[in-house]
Amino acid sequence: MDIAAISIRNKTVTLVMTAIMLLGGYVSYSGMSRLEDPEFTIKEALVITPYPGATAREVEEEVSDAIETRIQEMGQLDQVRSKSERGLSTITVQIKDNFDKETLPQVWDELRRKVNDAAPELPPGVGESIVVDDYGDVYGAFFVITGDGYTYSELKDYTDLLRRELLLVDDVGKVTTYGEREEAIYIEFSRDQLANLSISTSSILAALSAKNTVVDAGRVRVGDEYIAIWPTGAFDTVSSLGGLLLSGGSDKQFFLRDIATVRRDYIEPHDPMIFYNGRPGIGLGISTVSGGNVVDMGRALEQRMAELEQDRPIGIEVGVVSLQSDSVTTAISGFIESLVQAVSIVVVVLFLFMGLRSALIIGGILVVTIAGSFIFLDPMGVALERISLGALIIALGMLVDNAIVVVDGMLVRMNRGVAPDVAASETVNQSMWPLLGATIIAILAFAAIGTSQDSTGEFCRSLFQVVMVSLLLSWVTAITVTPLLGVMFLKTDDKSDKSEPFSGGFYNAYRGLLTTCLDNRLVTIVAVVGVFFVAIFAFTKVDQNFFPASTRPQFMVDIWMPQGTHIDDTAAQASAIATLIENEPGIDSITTVVGQGALRFILTYSTEKSNTGYAQLLVDIDDDVDLDQVVGRVDSLIAEAYPSVHSSTYKFEVGPGAKGKIEARFLGSDPAVLRQLANQARGILLADSGAKAVRSSWRQQVKTIRPVIAEEQANLNGISRGDIADVLAQAFSGKTVGLFREDDLLIPIVARAQSAERMDPASVESLQIWSPVANRMIPLRQVVSRFDVAFENEIIERQDRKRVVSVYADPRKGYATELLLRVQPKIEAMVLPEGYVLEWGGEFEDTADANGSLAESIPTFVALMVLITIVLFNSLRIPLIIWLCVPLAVIGVSFGLLSTKQSFGFMALLGFLSLSGMLIKNAIVLIDEIKENRANGAPLRQAVVDSGVSRLRPVAMAALTTALGMIPLIFDAFFVSMAVTIIGGLIFATLLTMFMVPVLFESFFIRDADLV
């Protein structure tokens, strides 16, 4: 089928379809979802189970183990990790990579069933397990509501207004708060007064419980009516609690307000907390519906908040921690600018080497192809984000390859006197199938990442989707629209030498050099192989990393106080550090979160789990300041001012990854041995000056006060261990003794001692406890012989039901691999007791997992690429020639990365894989021309040389446009290593290919030239 002739004959249809592609592409582009970074599914859920009063070891053995056992019955499970701490079990369930966001809801339903199955096996006193399956939700808008002079209640009222109104905004999926405090009814007793009146706290609690319990008095039939009976006496106001009548030891009655203070307040301590520029507030996170447009949501939010401005009390402010719509708009605008720059570079290069008409035709085809790609990408669910737009820039040079071959072939034939329409048909008919095969091979080079199921593959999947759609469309336009435009606009030079179009000095120089290489084939091959091995050695000197850090104008400061630190002290320390750095040049605002990490406001942010000794500063800087300088200055400033505080600064990650890039995991049974091994590893890391933020996942051991019960005396007085625990709890932290009902709220009632008594630990000596046997209060010291102080592990972690302790560290500067190479031999040299195992996590594990996922699929796609080359040429030797040239890319990659001081990370690996497709495509075009010349009767040497000369311009143009089109990506932190990899590898490899393919071809077929 002569597709070119059909397109030319049906000129109107071809042009109308082209116009439809342009218009449809614009419409699709305008409606596509916009994100800062591509979505990837966080395949984790949390199972949170409270066990009040239990030690970490009791939580581990009685709660975590039972739930983990049930969870491990799930076939979808990849890994289960647990964190058992005093009074709380937190289990992290990680699902296998082959489950996506469509299938995960069913998995979470099964997880809930397994957790429910474990409930009967849990001991008394364990609370209900909560499965949190929205752990990965991203709150693209994150605000903090503050107000000088306003009470918390007033701030909450305004926050509730915003929450109610913003939930109705288009594209808003969920609105949640952070740092919101819960209320409680506090009943504060005087211990001495209770003792003097011989009133037991248990009798008060029983009276409270009986008074405020919902009771059923039944119904009575009155005539034809059946009327409910509802006794009065329940508490309907907080003040009515004070009217509760109590009986004393002398048969006297007292009102509760006579012996206790009853007040309504917020639960203490406040956990977690959030501050904006030093002012306490309430966080408000807003997420986008799945598939929604975060930019549209951001605009709608801003509009609605402007409409609600009249309801904002003067003095209340809304601080912005993150507004992803602004970041997305800025990022997309920057990428569109880079895309326009890349297109301009490509057109200018084409103009310089192929003339104005050819450049405009190929540039026009490029625009049509890009526009048409959006028509197909939108229904595929591809959003406009960092990866997809970067993929268009990466694909630019390859998009013009097919059009360059067609236009160049037409020009050569037209310069020889062939009519334009005939030249178009001959060119397309000769190159159509080789170009299709080469295009598919180029697509398959990206297919490994496109089919990878892990988070890294999901993050980069749009790269494959964009390349696949755009390259296939470029082939379609090359054999349809390009011939038509060539016939319409290409003109030949009447003064040109129609018998020899390749007679210029550039072609003659290449011809002479190629002939020399062919005459000295062995020397040429040995020289290239020598350079190749030098490049392999040089590659060992290239730094390695996973994903680069982001240039987002915001960074984090993690602050770790000793384990067990009161949250108020942690907040005070975080506030002092925030005050220290707030006036540093370039710092715009500081958000402080205490007690746990913030809401996940960008996908790559890993939120820290609850810990009263943890705080984090989210520091925003001005757009025009150097992020690295500010981060380094703040890090040094904090280290000098607070040398004893464990703090560290971090930039945000661009792709999947987390803090703690160096992680040594020790698995075993004995907590003491595990802690000893962790301390040894910490010592090795601390001894390395390049390591920072060295910490253990189990943190420090904490003090516990252990009342030693005099069993005989306690038994004689009818006092149990639980009675003693209740007295101690009420004396200090308070004990929930009931619920107060107010409309739709259930507010806990907490009994505790008065403030002065709670704050005095020595008052434990004067505590009184009710003795049912003596029917009076007796001193607690009669049934508690002494109070011992002991140390315990407040945190115990497990991985797949094995105890595990992790030691983390991060590099002070440079890449994590440099630090790992220094400390890995020393840590691995540690003597591990029998039954104990060392594993490496962090960036080492992330890289291994991502590369392992690629390695599983790469052989399949390489086999397909090889098969296509065999089918194209019906030969085994020709594919061998082509694939022998692919490794030559290492030469340019090594020297490119070393000269620019870039690392070879995951994105550079993708660039290297894509190089194979580009080089194979160039080799196919060249060998196809050799075969065509041989078919026309040319001798082997003449066919090889003439083919190299005739394909020099299209191959060189394809490589040059691809390489120069990458220039805008050099200035993007995420793509720079990939851009350098492709530029360096493509230029060197293309140059060598134009000599090595002819040399290898002649070497392989010199003895039986009649076979080609």
Image (tube, rainbow, N blue to C red):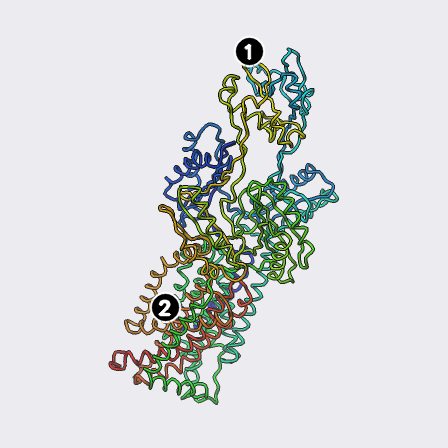
Judge left or right: residue 685 versus residue 1008. Answer: right
Q: Residue at x 32, y 78 (%)?
A: 1000
The spot of residue 170 in percent (x, y) is 59, 47
Residue 859 lies, with reference to residue 608, above or below; the image says below
Residue 201 lies, with reference to residue 84, above or below; the image says above
Q: Residue at x 57, y 27 (%)?
A: 728
The spot of residue 442 in percent (x, y) is 40, 67
The answer to which of marks 2 and 1 sits earlier in the sequence is 1
Disc 2: which residue: 437
Disc 1: which residue: 221
Residue at the far front: name it.
Answer: 785
Q: Residues within 10 Å of mark 1 (few under 14, many from 20)?
A: few
Question: From where the camera sits, is residue 207 visible?
Answer: no
Q: Secondary structure at mark 1?
A: strand
Q: Are dots 2 and 1 in contact, CB under 8 Å?
A: no
Judge left or right: residue 243 versus residue 415. Answer: right
Tag 2: amino acid: Gly
In the foreground, 457 or 786: 786
- Quarter location, residue 804: top left
